[in-house]
Structures are given as structure tokens and as C-alpha cells.
Image: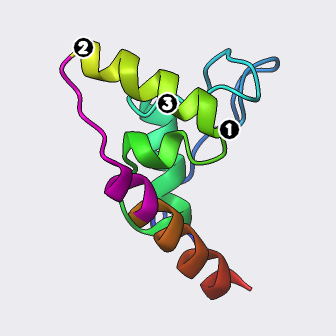
Amino acid sequence: MNHLGPFKLLPTSRGVCQECAVNHKPHEPHNAQSMFYQYHFYSLWGRWPTWADAMLHCSEEIRRITIEVLAENGISISTEQIADAKKLSNISTKTLT
């Protein structure tokens, strides 16, 4: 479902993440501050993404490192936020199928 209504995102450039339009490795989190990621995520799920959503596909180790780096920059992510993102992701995935 496209929650953006009549609006449509243009495709990303080649060689960048197709989810967030940023050049990062597949095991790294998406850039939650990328405007493309925010609108792409919203178009799919009908809500704005969080940093927890952006790192949901990452390993536990990458999540831990990302949470530490974000904390050093004044952004706190709790384990509850990760759990909530997982739960919302499962609900949304079931809704789409």
C-alpha cells in the first residue's frame, strides 16, 4: 500500500541503498535522517521511521555499536524501542501479505 497518496518517489541513484538512498554496506543501518528513507518507509508502513527501524535488519553487534554512536551524539535508543520496531515490522509484514 502506498501511504503517500498520489505522490511517488523517484528511483534512487545506482550504487546506493534502495531503501535510504545512501551509500552504505548492506549490514549497516539505513540513514534514518535521509529524506528518501523517511518517505519510502512512510509509503510502505504509514508511519515515520525511527533509528530503531533503520537498524532492524542489522546484527545485534551492529545495533549495539550504532546505539553507542548515536548515544555519543545525544540520541538514545532503548531495547524497548528495538522490540517495538520488531513488533511493528511483524504486524506490518503480516498486513501486507
Residue wearing tag 3 = 64
Camera-side residue: 26 or 72?
A: 72
Question: Does the magenta segment cover residue 35?
Answer: no
The relative height of residue 82 versus residue 34 in the rendered view (above or below) is: below
Spatial CA span between label 2 and label 1: 21 Å
Spatial CA span between label 3 and label 1: 9 Å
* Residue that sits furthest to the left in the current view: 74
- Residue at position x 81%, y 20% from top? 14
Q: Secondary structure at mark 3?
A: helix
Residue wearing tag 2 = 73
Label number found at residue 49:
none
Specify start and end residues of the magenta stretch as a single range.
74-83
Q: Is residue 48 visible?
A: no
Q: Earlier in the sequence, mark 3 or mark 1?
A: 1
Q: Secondary structure at mark 2?
A: loop
Dividing the picture into quarters, in which one does residue 5 lie?
bottom left
Q: Amino acid at mark 3?
A: Arg
Camera-side residue: 10 or 44?
A: 44
Give left or right: position of 38 versus 15: left
Badge 2: residue crowd in 10 Å (few <14, some 14–19, many ≥20): few
Q: Amino acid at mark 2?
A: Asn
